[in-house]
Amino acid sequence: MNSPVTDRTREPEVFQNIVAVRVSDSKPVSDAKGPEEVTMDLLLRDGPRRLSLSAALSLMSALEEAVDYVRRENSGLLDARPWTASQLKLVRDTLEWVRVMQAADHPVESLTDESIERSSLLRRIRAGKRALPAPPPTSFGQPWHEVLEADPGTVFKVSGGQITTLAEVLGTQNLSETARNHMMVQINGCHWNLLKTVEFDQRYVVSFSGYPYHYSLWRTEDGWRLTKT
C-alpha cells in the first residue's frame, strides 16, 4: 500500500535541516488575534528562515499523518525510537490526573477529547502544580484554585450572597436536623459553609468544605467581596 499524500506534505524539504526554532519577538503572542500574526525564526543548517505559525501547524499536521500511517502499517518500526522527556512527562502527568479523578469517583472511561482539553486539573498538573487535597470551589462552574491559594487579604469581587441550608441544596427536607440547620451561602454559583453571621445581609464568615481557611464575605455599594482572613 502506498503512503497517502496530501497537499500539506509539500512543504519545503529544507525544514528537515532545522537546528533550532524560536517564536519571533516582534509582537507578544498574547496580543495576537490569529495564527497569521505569529511567526517563528528557524535556524537551519544553511542559514536562518522565518516561518508563519499557520505553515508550522500545517507541517506538523502532515508529519503526524505520515507517522500515524507508519504506526498503522508497521508499528514495530517505531518501537526502537526513545521517548522524549516531554512525552514521558505527559504520560506521568496523565497518570496523576487519572489517579486524582478516580480517587474523587469521577469516571474516566467515558472521557472525550473535549473533556480532556477542557480539564483545568490536567492543565494544572501539566503546569507543575500538585492536585489539591480536596475538590476546590467553583466559580460559575469552573474550578476556582486561585481563591484557595491566594494570600490572606487578597480581595475577590463575587456575586451571590443568598443564604440557604444544606437540605435545600440537596433538594429535600427529608434529612437530619443537622442538615436542615447547616447554613450555606452561594458565592459565584457555588455553595460555601456559613460559619458566622456578623451582620445579616452585610457581612459573614465562610469556609469551603475540605479546607481549613476562613474567609470574610461582605457587601459593598457595587456588590459582594470575598477575602481570606
Image: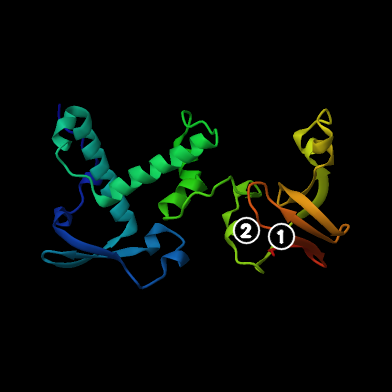
Frontmost of labels 2 and 1 is 1
> Is disc 2 placed on a helix, strand or loop?
helix
The residue carrying mark 2 is: 147
Residue 179, compared with residue 52, is above or below; it is: above
Pick the front one: 170 or 5:
170
| Residue 43 image point, x, y percent | 19, 66
Q: In the picture, which quadrant includes the N terminus? A: top left
Residue displayed at 25% across by 35% down = 68
Residue displayed at 50% across by 47% down = 121
Residue 97, compared with residue 3, is above or below; it is: below
Pick the front one: 110 or 107:
107
Residue 5, compared with residue 24, is above or below; it is: above
Number of on-image labels: 2
| Residue 187 image point, x, y percent | 73, 52
The disc, 2 or 1, on the residue closer to the chain's N-terminal end is 2
> Is disc 1 placed on a helix, strand or loop?
strand
When asked about the image quadrant of residue 204, the answer is: bottom right
| Residues at discs 2 and 1 in contact (Cβ within 8 Å) | yes
| Cα distance in 3D space between marks 2 and 1 | 10 Å
| Residue 125 image point, x, y percent | 44, 50
